[in-house]
Structures are given as C-alpha cells and as structure tokens.
Image (cartoon, rainbow, N blue to C red):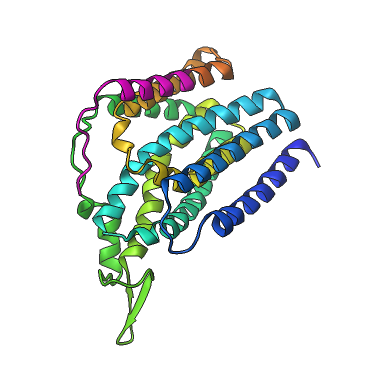
Amino acid sequence: MNPSQTAYLTFAVVLLLAVIFDLGLLSKKGAAVSISKALWQTCFWVLLAMAFMVFLWWESAPKTALEYLSAYLMEWSLSIDNIFVFILIFTFFRVQEQYYGRVLMIGILMAILLRILFISVGVELVSRFHQVLYVFGALLIYTGISMFLAKTDQQVNLADNRVYKWLQRILPITTEEAGGRFLLVRDGKKWYTSLFVVVVLLATTDLVFAIDSIPAVFGITQDKLVIYTSNIFAILGLRSLFFLLRGAVDKFSYLQQGIAVVLVFIGLKMLAEILHIILPVYVSLAVIVVCIAVSMLLSVTIPPNKKQYKP
C-alpha cells in the first residue's frame, strides 16, 4: 500500500469514528447545544484536523502537510460566512432550537456529498485542461474584489431564493408544525415540511460558497488527497462552529475583507504561473494566516458597522 492509499484509508477510518463519536457521545437528539458544548465540539474537530496534518507530515511530506493546513484554514475561514446565511435560513423558517443539531448534520452531510462531486469534476477538468486553473484564478480575483467592495448592510430575502422557489413549484410544502419530521401524510397525500426545505437550502447554500472556496484550494494545491480532506474536515466542523458563533457572527465585521484579500492573492498566484512564477506553499500559508488574523483583530478593536441580515 502506497502512502496515498494509506492516507485515504486512515482518513476514512478516522472520519467514520469521529462522526460516530460526535453524534453518539457529544450530541443528544433533540437537545439544545450550549456554548460550552459547542466549544468542546469545535476544539474536537479542529484538533482532529490538525492531527491529520501531523499524520500527512509524517506519512507523506512536509509540503503536503503545509498545503493541507493552508487549504483547511482557507475553507475554515470561508465557512464563517456560511454561518451568516445558515442563521438567516433558520430564522426565516422559524426552526425550533431543539432541531438545529439534527438538521445541520443532515444538511452538512448532503453538502459533503455535493462537494465531493464538485471537486471530482474540478480535478478531472484540471487534469485534462490545465488552463482551467487560469480561469479559476480570474474568477477568484473578480470574486475577491466584489466581496471587498460589497455593502455589508444589504438585506437578503429568502423568499426570492431560486432553490426555494423551485421546491415550491415541484413539491407540496407545508408550514405545519411536524414535530421534527421531514415528511407528513395528510388524507393520503405526502407533504414536505419546512425542515426538509431547510436541509436542502443548507446543502445548496454551501455549494454556492464552494464555487469560491474550491477554486481557491486548487490555487493552493492540485493534490486530490489534500483537496478532499481539507474540505471535508472544514465542513464537518461547521455544525459546532455554528452553535459557537451564532450569537457573535456580527462581531466579525472585517472578516469579509480579509477573506477577499486572500482570494485575490490566490487568484494572482494562479495567474502568475503563466509567467512561470511559482510561490512556495509557506507564502500562501503566511498570507492566509496574516489576513484572517488581522481582519479578526480589526473586528475586535474597531466598532463594527451595523451589519444586519434580515429575512
């Protein structure tokens, strides 16, 4: 068994045991998640991700481990933006807090499957047409500039969400309280509940964010193992991060600008390859860490603009 196969097998076993541990021991069905429990769960997923980095350092090479760390930090910081939208979705559909944990987990598992499909398509495209990386680079620069200049006080109306409108057209949806169920049967007819809609919106919302984050990871590395594992570890930690940050997401008022600078940098790094300029992986890692750290420091020290997300 070669190092790559060993890494994949180790990742699969660790991931399976971790999900069982998280669902079986750290989470109770129907129970609200406290800040302290969310902190422990967040630490659990972050430490597990770092332990896998140490494994890659030992099993593969330091370069692979640093690429993994860079990609993980990129995905992890972008996932905070996910939480803004997740909060909006739960608020719009008036989901009871006791159902948050289960709905988040199902939505995140669906998001992982969609991401695996999305990454697989990206890997195949890059392997066949290397020039696709330059398209990704241009996309990241455009996205980063747009994100940096975007107004942060704009309102978002989920009633206009395309996926939600599509679900309303093709499925019978009820707003009736269903006791945490996703499907109801009334007079022989099946009705899909708001919780079902929420799960679908969580998964598709994450896929929209993946359109930015996955090309960014391709800008850091084209190693399939690194791309898959960094994405999955970051997304699995989203649930606990949601409970930890849901009351404080509006405090990170400058994080969007920090992420935007990182996206522009990675886009420029990808386009620089046309001129045969290859930056070492530790440069990417340093830029990611500095930008995210500075943006969070500014968010804490400078009074935030009144950033509101209203349904």
The answer to whether 169 appears left or right of 6 in the picture is left
Would you say the magenta stretch is mainly helix, strand or loop?
helix
User: Magenta segment range?
Assistant: 287-311
Query: Which of 31 and 92 lies nearest the eye of the viewer?
Result: 31
Q: Quadrant of residue 102?
A: bottom left
The image shows residue 217 at horizontal and vertical percentages of: 51, 31
Q: Quadrant of the N terminus?
A: top right
Return the residue found at the far bottom.
Answer: 187
Return the residue found at the far right.
Answer: 1
Q: Residue at x 50, y 26 (%)?
A: 219
Query: Which of 24 and 55 lies nearest the eye of the viewer?
Result: 24
The image shows residue 226 at horizontal and vertical percentages of: 60, 35
Q: Is residue 230 magenta?
A: no
Query: Which of 248 and 117 lies nearest the eye of the viewer?
Result: 248
- The reply to whether residue 108 is visible in this rendering is yes
The answer to whether 281 appears left or right of 35 in the picture is right
- The reply to whether residue 121 is visible in this rendering is no
The image shows residue 58 at horizontal and vertical percentages of: 74, 29
Q: Is residue 301 magenta?
A: yes
Q: Residue at x 30, y 67 (%)?
A: 170
The answer to whether 153 appears left or right of 241 in the picture is left
The image shows residue 278 at horizontal and vertical percentages of: 56, 15
Q: Quadrant of residue 211?
A: top left
Q: Quadrant of residue 21?
A: bottom right
Q: Is residue 268 above or below residue 116?
A: above
